[in-house]
Amino acid sequence: MRTRNIGFTLLELLVVVAIIGLLAAYVGPRYFSQIGKSEQTVARAQVEAFAKALDAYRVDVGSYPATEAGLAALVTRPADAARWSGPYMPKVLPADPWGRQYLYRALSATEYDLVSYGKDGVPGGSGDDADIANR
């Protein structure tokens, strides 16, 4: 009577490895493209949170912070803001999802620009490199 060895042959193992490789090649790019979309979504949400805090600052003080004071005016009272009743944001201002600070510029007492230059960190771009701004 002959006994048969129980196990997998080399061919069976190669087929399984090939199937796993094909699945990884198909799913991987879709998964990593979702990560880029989520970073863009986080940046938009942070810009909206800054906009609400800046609006609250404007209601209290009468104008948006000066460019020189920047977003730090949402956390610490600027010298020229007598009616400041903050802080309007947590003690540590969040960076954008790519680790850079948001760029703030006061255009007038009633207008401002707030922007993150996206993944590439330079103005313009599309996809993950697109700028996220308040307008």
Image: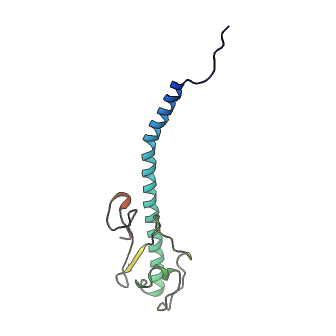
Residue shown at 53% from the left, 80% from the top: 75
Taking the image as shown, residue 70 lies to the left or right of residue 89, namely left
Farthest-out residue, right: 1
Q: Report the front residue among 134 and 24.
A: 24
Q: Report the front residue among 135 and 15.
A: 15
Q: Position of residue 125 (x, y in %)?
A: 32, 62
Farthest-out residue, top: 1
Residue shown at 63% from the left, 15% from the top: 4
Name the quarter where the N terminus is drawn: top right
Q: Position of residue 96 (x, y in %)?
A: 46, 67
The correct choice, above or below, for 70 with respect to 40 in the image is: below
Residue shown at 65% from the left, 10% from the top: 2
Q: Report the front residue among 17 and 41.
A: 17
Quarter where residue 117 is shown: bottom left
The correct choice, above or below, for 29 with respect to 69 in the image is: above
Q: Position of residue 21 (x, y in %)?
A: 47, 37
The correct choice, above or below, for 37 with respect to 111 in the image is: above
The correct choice, above or below, for 82 with respect to 120 in the image is: below
Name the quarter where the C terminus is drawn: bottom left
Q: Position of residue 101 (x, y in %)?
A: 45, 72
Residue shown at 53% from the left, 25% from the top: 10
